[in-house]
Image: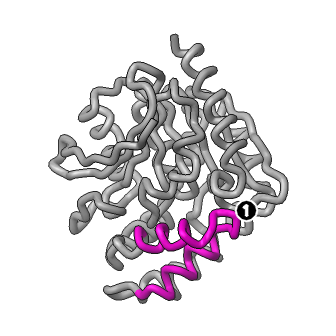
Amino acid sequence: MSTAAATIVIGNGLRLSFAERGDESGPNLLLLPGPTDSWVSYEPVLSRLPSWIHVIALSLRGHGDSDKPAFGYQVEDFAADVVAFLDAVGIKSAVLAGHSGSCLVARRVAIDWPERVAGLVLEASPTTLKGDTRFEAFVRSTVLNLVDPIGHAFARNFVVDTSTDLIGEEMVERLVEELLKVPARVWKETMSGLLRYDDLDELEHIVAPTLLIWGDADSLVGQEMQEHLARAIPDANLSRYPGIGHTPRWEDPARFASEVGAFVGRSQRKSA
């Protein structure tokens, strides 16, 4: 079974890029890559996910081959795009899987449009990045000083620092190529938006079953954050990946695909 890449125009006029795989009559799984990544970042797991699941990996606005408007890079903007995308492709509800900062987008959809979310998969999810001194220092010292064109060396260092040797050199270069499609202004607006966003007081309103996936060698998102989320989200369970870093789906794609597939199955039965 092949992966088909396509674009679609959503209700606000933006054209978004996505890849699709699996049985269109099956339960829906929408994959949301982390900031600066495109749908390509899910390639290591797309072919491993069960074929009975209808899987879509989406490049959010400003990323990959999706449109890059002059503004609209707050978490709330991305969340509204997700709902508009579901409308455009005719999907009533889906399991949303986010990574890193895009977990905040998935959570926003679950809070504001609970009927559209059959389940949440939060991979390496922060609680909030507001007040995070390390992230704030990175944004102020590095991101806000970026200019176009972003250099290959910077892009490669960024990918390697959040990556693993297990994905191989070819995949690293694919990820670098996709990252270089993100303009400096999108970096700045997206990262600045993450610094302002905080939904911790609203997590109790998430009704979707939630799977937290976290590698205990993650140097960016710590155990305290995962324990907080597991307590705050009413129906949340934490799956810990020993010795794994910030992107579990790259380091242990077989386990990730198996767990997410099983979770989609359980979520489908709950929502039936």
Q: Dot 1, how many residues are within 10 Å of its Cα: few (below 14), some (14-19), or many (20+)? A: many
Residue 234 in percent (x, y) is at 66, 30
| Residue 31 is covered by the magenta coloring | no
> Most extreme residue toward the left, as rendered?
13
Q: Is residue 23 above or below residue 29?
A: above
Give, as a single range, the part of the protein colored magenta. Answer: 151-178
Magenta span main SS: helix
- Whether 21 is drawn above or below 178: the answer is above
Give residue 2's position: percent from left, percent from top. 42, 40
Q: In percent of the image, x 77 and y 47: which residue is there?
A: 227
Q: Nearer the viewer, residue 265 or 5?
A: 5
Compared to 160, does 16 lie above or below? above
Which residue is found at the position 63% from the left and 35% from the top? 260
Residue 236 % position (x, y): 69, 33
SS category of the residue bearing label 1: loop
Q: Residue at x 47, y 68 (%)?
A: 174
For this orientation, the residue located farthest to the top is: 272
Residue 190 image-quadrant placement = bottom left
- Residue 97 position (above or below residue 15): above
User: What residue lies at 56% left-to-right and 26% top-to-bottom?
Assistant: 207
